[in-house]
Image (cartoon, rainbow, N blue to C red):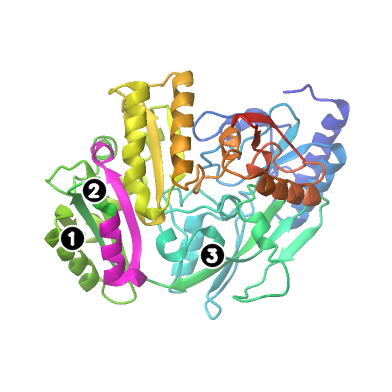
């Protein structure tokens, strides 16, 4: 980190005055905020700013812009791509939105809720439930992840199959721009064809165009009737036929369609005390849920009956109590290997067309065996109905196992090529952050990268917000297919 100059020291004093005694932290006192969730990326800011209103955010942005000090926004700090930690190589402040955590309004007549950026997803879910409505967005980190973070990464999660990613839940938003002005797009309209829909620039923008401060979210009728089922698959290749079968049975009420590996089931049993759902042990399982305003029994039972008759499923169970339901979704929430095994290797937030999920998994296994031998493990789980697999290649599913960095890089390159050959993406829902800068550029055309850089340069010409993060900062492929030096606006 560069040495602190006198103007930067004055900026810190000014920010402390702007923020008040409760509105800032010394980085020394907040080490958990300066290292990413996976322990891969870190940085030391001049100050951790904790504003509690849009007016204070404006004052912080103007002060930092005047001093030429960058701003990295942070919500619940659950990013898996290193996008929410301070910069290295350039002085920055870390702007945490966690004190901006108020539900502004709930409007059942409009099926909307307006929340500040620091509200957790669970907080919004509870506010919606209090008026017998439901938020479409949901994922395992619901108690920590925030609205602003979800918007910035266009987060996906468990309900994308029915409600879409975060983008489909956002009706309007407010953001502070690089000059301190406020973009007020807090509209609750379903239709508005009066020009560019500017809110979408901030959704998935990873904090690179402004600080999102408030969001209007779409709500839905509350789904009080659920049937979650857990089924042992006859083979992985059955998944696409099963998905088509479930959609044909009741696509409107199909809310989740998840792939679960036996290694994950065994791990959650050992680590979190999950109860094994089935006595039958298989390589792969399906975790699916039908939900509705009326009974989902017919859809779930009919689907399982069809699946067994077709030989696609060898055993299954349906949760009939709240405890059984909770057990199944606890298992799903705790599948990520960062906490389950603490094993490190090559990580993929991959998506392919939904009919190629099994093909991609098998191809990744073959590539891994070729490069690493038979000992390495390809650990995958995720959202079958979205074509999104969270795939990890690790030396072993043992705590502390680590893959040689050179080998991990070779595996990453080979599996990325597989993804692109299948029309896939290396970033399905976790964002680019810092983690994918050297990879995502090979997925984008020069025209697409240039368009993103033009938008960044127009709205943030001094690269104030989250510098060096996001797809617009990706390495540009050279003519031989290898990344060249990253370009910035």
Q: Is residue 32 above or below residue 222?
A: above
Disc 2 secondary structure class: strand
Q: Residue at x 63, y 45 (%)?
A: 445
> Which of pointers 1 and 3 indicates the residue nearer the eye?
1
Disc 1 secondary structure class: helix
**Seen in the image, is 354 located left or right of residue 21?**
left
Q: Is residue 77 magenta?
A: no
Q: CA distance from mark 1 to mark 2?
A: 13 Å
Quadrant in which residue 319 is drawn: bottom left
Which mark, by number, is residue 169?
Answer: 3
Quadrant in which residue 335 is drawn: top left
Question: What secondary structure is the magenta-colored segment mainly?
Answer: helix
> Which of pointers 1 and 2 indicates the residue nearer the eye?
1
First-in-chain label (2 vs 3)? 3
- Residue most extreme to the bottom: 109
Q: Nearer the viewer, residue 393 or 141?
A: 393
Q: Position of residue 8 (x, y in %)?
A: 83, 31
**Residue 334, can we see it?**
no
**Seen in the image, is 261 located left or right of residue 162?**
left
Q: Is residue 158 above or below residue 418?
A: below
What residue is disc 1 on? 307
Residue density around tag 3, few if under 14, some if 14–19, many if 20 or more, within 10 Å: many
Give the position of the N terminus as an image quadrant. Answer: top right
First-in-chain label (1 vs 3)? 3
Q: Position of residue 387 (x, y in %)?
A: 40, 52
Q: Nearer the viewer, residue 71 or 415?
A: 415
Give the position of the C terminus as an image quadrant. Answer: top right
Q: Residue at x 30, y 77 (%)?
A: 294
What residue is disc 2 on? 285
> In this picture, which residue range is highlighted in magenta?
240-266
Q: Position of residue 155 (x, y in %)?
A: 52, 52
């Amino acid at each position: 980190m560069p040495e602190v100059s006198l103007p930067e020291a004055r900026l810190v004093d000014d920010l402390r005055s702007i923020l008040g005694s409760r509105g800032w932290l010394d980085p020394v006192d907040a080490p958990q905020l300066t290292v990413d969730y996976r322990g891969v990326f870190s940085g030391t800011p001049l100050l951790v700013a904790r504003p509690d209103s849009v007016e204070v955010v404006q004052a912080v942005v103007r002060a930092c812009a005047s001093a030429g000090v960058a701003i990295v926004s942070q919500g619940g700090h659950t990013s898996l791509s290193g996008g929410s930690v301070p910069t290295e190589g350039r002085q920055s402040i870390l702007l945490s939105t966690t004190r901006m955590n108020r539900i502004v309004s709930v409007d059942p007549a409009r099926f909307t809720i307006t929340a500040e950026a620091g509200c957790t997803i669970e907080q919004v879910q509870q506010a919606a439930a209090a008026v017998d409505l439901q938020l479409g967005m949901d994922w395992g980190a619901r108690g920590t992840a925030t609205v602003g973070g979800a918007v910035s990464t266009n987060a996906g999660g468990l309900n994308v199959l029915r409600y879409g990613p975060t983008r489909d839940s956002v009706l309007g938003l407010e953001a502070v721009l690089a000059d301190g002005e406020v973009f007020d797009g807090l509209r609750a309209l379903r239709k508005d064809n009066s020009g560019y829909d500017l809110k979408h620039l901030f959704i998935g923008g990873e904090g690179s165009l402004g600080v999102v401060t408030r969001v209007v979210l779409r709500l839905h009728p509350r789904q009080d009737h659920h049937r979650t089922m857990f089924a042992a698959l006859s083979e992985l290749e059955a998944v696409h036929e099963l998905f088509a079968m479930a959609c044909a049975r009741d696509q409107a009420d199909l809310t989740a369609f998840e792939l679960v590996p036996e290694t994950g089931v065994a791990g959650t049993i050992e680590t979190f005390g999950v109860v094994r759902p089935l006595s039958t042990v298989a390589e792969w399982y399906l975790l699916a849920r039908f939900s509705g305003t009326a009974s989902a029994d017919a859809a779930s039972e009919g689907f399982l009956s069809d699946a067994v008759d077709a030989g696609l499923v060898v055993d299954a169970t349906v949760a009939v109590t709240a405890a059984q339901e909770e057990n199944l979704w606890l298992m799903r929430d705790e599948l990520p290997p960062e906490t389950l095994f603490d094993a490190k290797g090559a990580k993929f937030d991959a998506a392919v067309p939904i009919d190629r999920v099994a093909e991609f998994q098998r191809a990744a296994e073959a590539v891994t065996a070729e490069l690493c031998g038979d000992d390495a493990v390809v650990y995958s789980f995720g959202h079958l109905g979205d074509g999104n697999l969270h795939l990890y290649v690790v030396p072993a599913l043992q705590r502390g196992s680590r893959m040689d960095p050179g080998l991990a890089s070779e595996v990453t390159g080979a599996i990325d090529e597989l993804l692109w050959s299948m029309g896939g993406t290396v970033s399905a829902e976790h964002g680019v952050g810092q983690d994918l800068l050297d990879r995502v550029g090979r997925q984008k055309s020069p025209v697409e990268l240039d368009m993103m850089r033009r938008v960044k340069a127009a709205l943030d010409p001094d690269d104030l917000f989250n510098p060096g993060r996001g797809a617009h900062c990706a390495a540009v492929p050279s003519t031989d297919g290898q990344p060249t030096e990253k370009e910035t606006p």
